[in-house]
Image: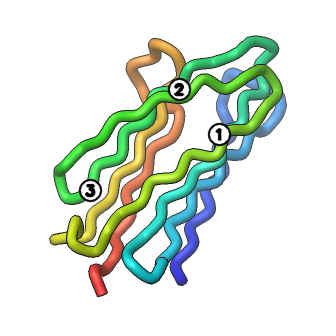
């Protein structure tokens, strides 16, 4: 099992914020999972882009104030060629991601 944990400390906030990204090997492929914490006092829309070997998928989620949303993306073994997975998380209309990472996974 491969697990990756990422901690993000935004420069514009006083309190540290944690977003946990994991890639877990399952029986039929891999599972990318990210906990998105909205510590703001209003709901926030997030845009999530997952790219697997250059094929991108875009999703969105609205997270209520003070709540956590768990995003899950299944990566079947037959979808993997090079095994390069990129995860990008955008908050609201921001053009720069608040979280981004590239992961290298195998197809066996």
Cβ–Cβ under 8 Å for marks 2 and 1: yes
> Residue 2 location in percent, x, y?
52, 78
Q: Secondary structure at mark 3?
A: strand
Q: Which of the two residues, 97 or 70, is positioned nearer the viewer here?
A: 70
Q: Residue at x 42, y 25 (%)?
A: 96
Residue 78's disc number: none
> Mark 2: few, some, or many residues within 10 Å (few <14, many ≥20)?
many
Q: Point out the tag, 2 or 1, that comes first from the N-terminus.
A: 1
Q: Secondary structure at mark 1?
A: strand
Residue 46's disc number: 2
Q: Residue at x 44, y 82 (%)?
A: 27
> Residue 90 location in percent, x, y?
47, 28
Residue 52's disc number: 3
Quarter of the image for the N terminus: give it.
Answer: bottom right
The residue that mark 1 highlights is 36
Quarter of the image for the C terminus: give it.
Answer: bottom left
Q: Quadrant of residue 77?
A: bottom left
């Amino acid at each position: 099992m491969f697990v990756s944990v990422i901690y993000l400390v935004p420069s514009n906030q006083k309190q540290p914020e944690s977003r946990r990204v994991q890639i877990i090997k399952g029986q039929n492929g891999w599972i990318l999972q990210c906990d998105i914490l909205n510590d703001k006092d209003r709901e926030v829309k997030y845009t999530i882009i997952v790219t697997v070997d250059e094929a991108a998928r875009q999703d969105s989620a609205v997270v209520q104030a003070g709540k956590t949303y768990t995003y899950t993306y299944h990566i079947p073994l037959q979808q993997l060629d090079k095994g390069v997975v990129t995860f990008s998380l955008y908050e609201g209309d921001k053009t720069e991601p608040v979280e981004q990472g590239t992961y290298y996974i195998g197809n066996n």
